Amino acid sequence: MTKPLDCGDCSMCCKIPNIPRAEGDVIFNPDREDGSKLEGEWCQHCRPGKGVCSVYEDRGPTCREYKCVWLQSQDRGAGAMPLSMRPDKSKVMLQPTVGGRGMIFRVLPENWGAWQKGTAKKLLMKLWQSDLIAFAADTRGRRAALTPAAQDAVLKFTEDSDEEA
């Protein structure tokens, strides 16, 4: 089965976030005793890049109720985020901070720095102009606070750290 057209070929919600298994959910990862999916691993039912879930019609409540920030924005009409901010296009999956005072720019390790490009960068600048906070996080545990003053230093530090690894 194919996902609703709103998601297009995007399936980043099937990889980036940690998905604990709730009652009524399918098994996301058969190698885990509880069937949950860890951050950064694909759900076993996903067909990456095709926008296809092999159990779409029978998916459980966790997947049925989930809407990423980009998809939620599509309900806002004129306030909708552009297609370029869809996670598969921007390489950024947005997550509100606890308390809603900012945004976490969630990325795969190979896309570290994606928040500095295109529409994602414009959104980051709007957050700063509104005195909201922003963080970056990848699926291997790398984290950074994004501030106008620290932006270049964060990228330099993480690029240097990657070279040493």
Image (cartoon, rainbow, N blue to C red):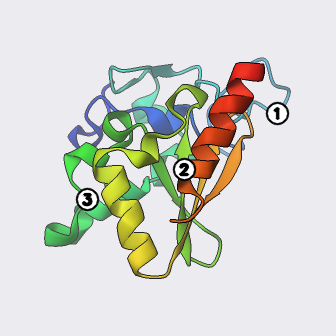
In the rendered view, does 70 fall on the left or right side of 74?
right
Q: Nearer the viewer, mark 3 or mark 2?
A: 2
In the rendered view, does 66 fall on the left or right side of 7?
right
Q: Which mark is residue 152?
A: 2
* Residue occupying image coordinates x 86% and y 27%: 33
Q: Residue furthest bottom?
A: 131
**Residue nearest the viewer, comparing 85 with 54:** 85
Q: Residues within 10 Å of mark 2 (few under 14, many from 20)?
A: few
Q: Position of residue 162 (x, y in %)?
A: 69, 25
Q: CA distance from mark 3 to mark 1?
A: 35 Å
Secondary element under disc 1, as helix, strand or loop, is loop
Quadrant in which the N terminus is drawn:
top left
Q: Which quadrant holds residue 165? A: top right
Q: Position of residue 138 (x, y in %)?
A: 63, 39
Q: Kindly indicate whether the residue at mark 1 contacts the one at mark 3 (C-beta within 8 angstroms).
A: no
Q: Nearer the viewer, mark 3 or mark 1?
A: 3
Q: Kindly indicate whether the residue at mark 2 contacts the one at mark 3 (C-beta within 8 angstroms).
A: no
* Residue occupying image coordinates x 36% and y 21%: 49
Q: Which mark is residue 120?
A: none
Q: Position of residue 46 (x, y in %)?
A: 48, 23
Q: Position of residue 92 (x, y in %)?
A: 44, 43
* Residue occupying image coordinates x 56% and y 78%: 101
Which residue is label 3 attached to? 81
Which residue is label 1 attached to? 34
Say what amino acid the circle numbered 1 marks.
Answer: Asp
Q: Which quadrant holds residue 5? A: top left
